[in-house]
Image (cartoon, grey):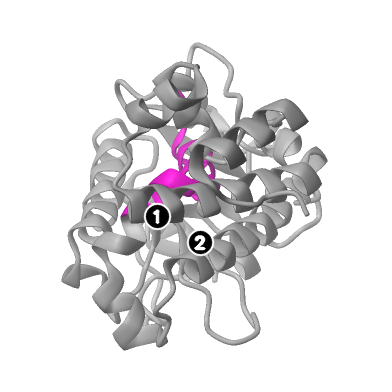
Amino acid sequence: MSNVVSRLQQYQSPTPSRWRENAERRQANKNWLRYSQSIAMKMLDKMEELHLSQTQLADKMGCSQQYISKVLRGQENLSIETIAKIESALSIQILC
Amino acid sequence: MTFDLITEDGRLWAVRYEGAEDNALDAVFNQWNDVLWLREFFKANIDDLVSYFKITDVNDAIYDTIEDSDKLECLILDISPDADLDKLFRPLENSRIDEKLLSKEKARIHNRPHHASWLRIYAIKLEPGKYIITGGAIKLTATMQEREHTLRELQNMEKVRQFLIANNVIDEDAFQDYLKEL
């Protein structure tokens, strides 16, 4: 091992990083994540058009603002039931 | 600041800044897959997107970012023990040809269709083939000094560089020895 690596090891983080786990999760779930991200984009466009806040959408859908925030980040594996609620709350078509 | 091993062989590291949940590499890939964050970013930088890339639809920019981020992430996940990291990271200044102590470097993907990739991963070169990732950015302008978010990346690179020098992770003598070997 080179000197520089052994010296750097003295400053290694005390807790393990989750970057590889997160990256592998993204790679493994790529297909549905793309759908989730695409739905988030549609929702954000419509929310902007309707001047609707995350809290107002949460009220319409009967869920928390925190959950809406997760959905809008495009990271949620949405159920058919949730997609139907989004379609109804925003008057958009997601599923054909 | 502390450092996380990215490859088990000790050739690639990432900085974990004070107060950060995880390292800089994890942070940039989380941002580059976060639709809400990307939409806010591109709306704030729409003028650069239009003038430098002729893209007017924020959603197109988000799709391209997620696609490029995926390719960059695969590149890093797939680094094998015999991969040459000096081919992944290139000098930050395209014109630089001389060796500099703890030089500033960048990684990006090449040959993407339609437009050049705007994603950058920034790193400090410890010695040939060994790097520390300091962060990343969506670079829409010609120079990093032009925008606050890219300027901040330059400052972070310098901060890490100074930390490594101050804590004797690498010293001038070691670098002089390396230069003599060239």
Residue A36 in the image: state x and y as whole percent: 66, 43
Mark 1 belongs to chain: B
Residue for point 62% across, 65% down: B88
Q: Find numbered disc 2 in the image and state the secondary structure of the residue it sits on.
A: helix
Q: Is residue B72 above or below residue B144?
A: above
Q: Distance between the residues labelled 2 and 1?
A: 7 Å
**Residue B13's spot in the image, x, y percent?**
54, 39
Q: Is residue A23 above or below residue A50?
A: above
Residue B153 in the figure: left or right of residue B81: left
Residue B62, disc: 2
Please give the range of residues in magenta. Answer: B21-40
Q: Picture quarter containing residue A75? A: top right
Q: How crowded is mark 2: few (under 14 residues within 10 Å), some or many (20 or more)?
A: many
The quarter of the image holding the N terminus of chain B is top left
What is the secondary structure assignment of the residue under circle 1?
helix
* Residue behind mark 1: B39
Name which residue lies at 74% across and 33% down: A25
Question: Chain for mark 2?
Answer: B
Does residue B160 belong to the magenta stretch? Answer: no
Q: Which of marks 2 and 1 is nearer the N terminus?
A: 1
Image x and y of residue B5, in percent: 59, 32
In this rendering, do the residues under marks 2 and 1 share a single chain? yes
Instruction: Give the amino acid type for the residue marked by disc 2 in the picture.
Output: Ile
Decide whether the magenta segment is chiefly helix, strand or loop: helix
